[in-house]
Amino acid sequence: MSDRSDLIITGKEFAFDAERDAEFERLIKRYPTRESMILPALWLTQEQEGWISVEAMAYIADRIGTFAAKVYEAATFYTMFNLKPMGKYHIAVCRTLSCWLREKQEIVDYLAKEVGVVPGKMTDDGKFSLEEVECLGHCGTAPVIQLNGEFHEEMDVDKLKALLATLE
């Protein structure tokens, strides 16, 4: 399990780009309170940067008008938010019961042995990162992984090998 409290301070000011800024303004009108925008703002940040820095959390808090601790609380609670830079190909493997019983550990072991990436880490070349996450909501088609947010169900080592072979 990765340490969710290992936050990174970049020393660089964060702001939404024009596209995310426009989306933020569009979305904020749909929510009953500004604080309701914490999760959407975190998603916009991750979409823009690939991960969420301390500076981004402070920016979101200022933009929404809330405490940075509330943004931190949400960002560190949900495992789908990346709190450090991820590899070009980020693999999330479900670690809950259905996937465990259908041999998700073989997938994790293969990635460690053949790709050189273990949960919570990134390969030295920055190509792959791996994370074990809570339920991805596809229990009937376990085990399931996400590759850069795209679901791949009924995964096994052979299917994973074929999937990885399609990557640059």
Image (spheres, rainbow, N blue to C red):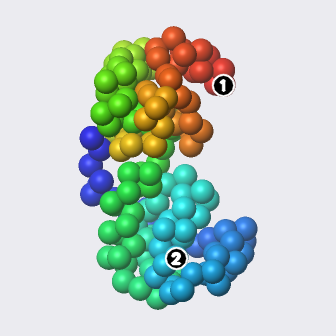
What is the three-letter code of the residue carrying label 2? Met
Residue beneath disc 2:
37
Left or right: 94 in relation to 37: left
Q: Position of residue 15 (x, y in %)?
A: 58, 73
**Which residue occupies 27% across, 57% down?**
5
Q: Nearer the viewer, residue 162 or 95?
A: 95
Rate crowding at label 1 as few (under 14), some (14 to 19) or many (20 or more) other CA atoms within 10 Å: few
Q: What whole-number distance in Å separates the C-alpha atoms at marks 1 and 2?
A: 36 Å
Q: Are marks 1 and 2 in contact (CB under 8 Å)?
A: no
Quadrant position of the N terminus in the picture: top left
The answer to whether residue 140 of the structure is visible from this angle is yes
Q: Nearer the viewer, residue 159 or 13?
A: 159
Q: Position of residue 73 (x, y in %)?
A: 32, 69
Left or right: 77 in relation to 56: left
Residue beneath disc 1:
168
**Which residue occupies 47% across, 88% down?**
65
In the displayed structure, 150 sits above or below 50; it is above
Q: Position of residue 34 (x, y in %)?
A: 51, 85
What is the three-letter code of the residue carrying label 1? Glu
Q: Nearer the viewer, mark 1 or mark 2?
A: 2
**Extreme residue toward the front, this view:** 140
| Secondary structure of the residue carrying numbered label 2 | helix
Q: Position of residue 96 (x, y in %)?
A: 32, 37
| Secondary structure of the residue carrying numbered label 1 | loop
Q: Quadrant of residue 53?
A: bottom left
Left or right: 23 in relation to 32: right
Q: Nearer the viewer, residue 114 or 153?
A: 153
In the displayed structure, 144 sits above or below 65; it is above
